[in-house]
Image (tube, grey):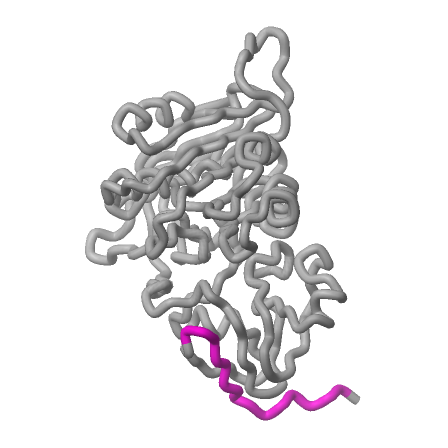
Amino acid sequence: MTAATPAGPFQITVQPSGRSFSVEPGEAILAAAIRQGIGLPYGCKDGACGSCKCRKLEGQVVHGSHQSKALSSEEEANNLVLTCRAVPQTDVVLESRQVTDESAFPIRKMPSRVITLEKVSHDVMVVKLQLPANDTLRYHAGQYIEFILRDGARRSYSMANAPHMGPAVELHIRHMPGGKFTDHVFTAMKEKEILRVEGPFGSFYLREDSDKPMVLLASGTGFAPIKALIEHLQFKGSQRQAVLYWGGRRPSDLYMDAWVRDRLADMPNLRYVPVISNALPEDNWTGRTGFVHKAVMEDFPDLSGHQVYACGAPIVVDSARAEYSSQCRLPPEEFYADAFTTEADKHRD
């Protein structure tokens, strides 16, 4: 005999903002927050990345299935919760300093039309989408959209252009051989094709209430949302110091290297450090080598006064999150991430 679902609805309060919202019986906290426009942090929505993790101050929840690297049993015992998998059993009080009154835009479903397809490396396609002229998609630079495929499956991609560069949306899609969606992108997709999208999603965007210097950390196509942040900084005339570390296995993986270098001429507060981990002799690479997140640690042994925005492979983002806090004194709440997590990788095929 299964246990009865608590009656609900339950009230969720987020401190220190004091914002509150209700959760229906059996509903996860994050799903209810998104539905009601409350900007809780999140990434994969699948219990895989840990981006939505926050502290529970009061109340009881039960967790659905999730990966232990996103929330360990020890963390759960210490009152940390994954809001994407946490179903309240009582009223709950959470602590999340990322929640603000202006952090969430309405989530919309809309048709989109492929405008252009440009292959910028052997396995990266830049796809530009046209959205309905009378249905503007409002989003923060750094957020992502989801394609809704005909069978109901979803694939998530960060928007690589800042909102002011719209109304077209730019995506950087890496080919995952054998993948249902990316095989189509690289072999059969044509201009004018109609695709259904939903968004914006994600809490990866610039915190503009701070003037702290920033480290922008990208690996591979994790550069896409970082590019949007750079465009947004330039558009706003920001005077904040920023340094971009972009890592790849081979130099060709830095598929918009020239674009970045062009920005440097117009953005005196932006620096660029490309890092290659597996250069071959024929690459004639003379720049930085090794793991991109380690290059940051070499240059910034003390990150206590910085913000870090990181996107890319989970091993890079997870290592950076742990090591910057434990070894470089970065306050954990100043690390903002959108990892291509193990579960999300399945959504990017």
Q: Is residue 102 visible?
A: yes
Residue 239 magenta: no
Report the span colored magenta.
2-17
Q: Is residue 114 above or below residue 139?
A: above
Q: Is residue 153 visible?
A: no
Q: Nearer the viewer, residue 257 or 241?
A: 241
Measured from the top left, where is residue 334 in percent x and y? 49, 53
Most distant residue in the bottom direction: 7
Quarter of the image where the C terminus is located: top right
Which picture quadrant has residue 59? bottom right
Measured from the top left, where is residue 318 in percent x and y? 63, 46
Measured from the top left, where is residue 72 in percent x and y? 73, 62
Residue under the point 65% across and 48% down: 326
Residue under the point 50% across and 68% down: 96
Residue under the point 52% across and 57% down: 333
Most distant residue in the right direction: 1
Q: Is residue 5 above or below residue 192?
A: below
Quarter of the image where the N terminus is located: bottom right
The rendered magenta stretch, by its main secondary structure, is classed as loop
Residue under the point 54% across and 80% down: 93
Measured from the top left, where is residue 163 in percent x and y? 28, 48
Q: Nearer the viewer, residue 276 or 255?
A: 276
Q: Is residue 287 above or below residue 48?
A: above
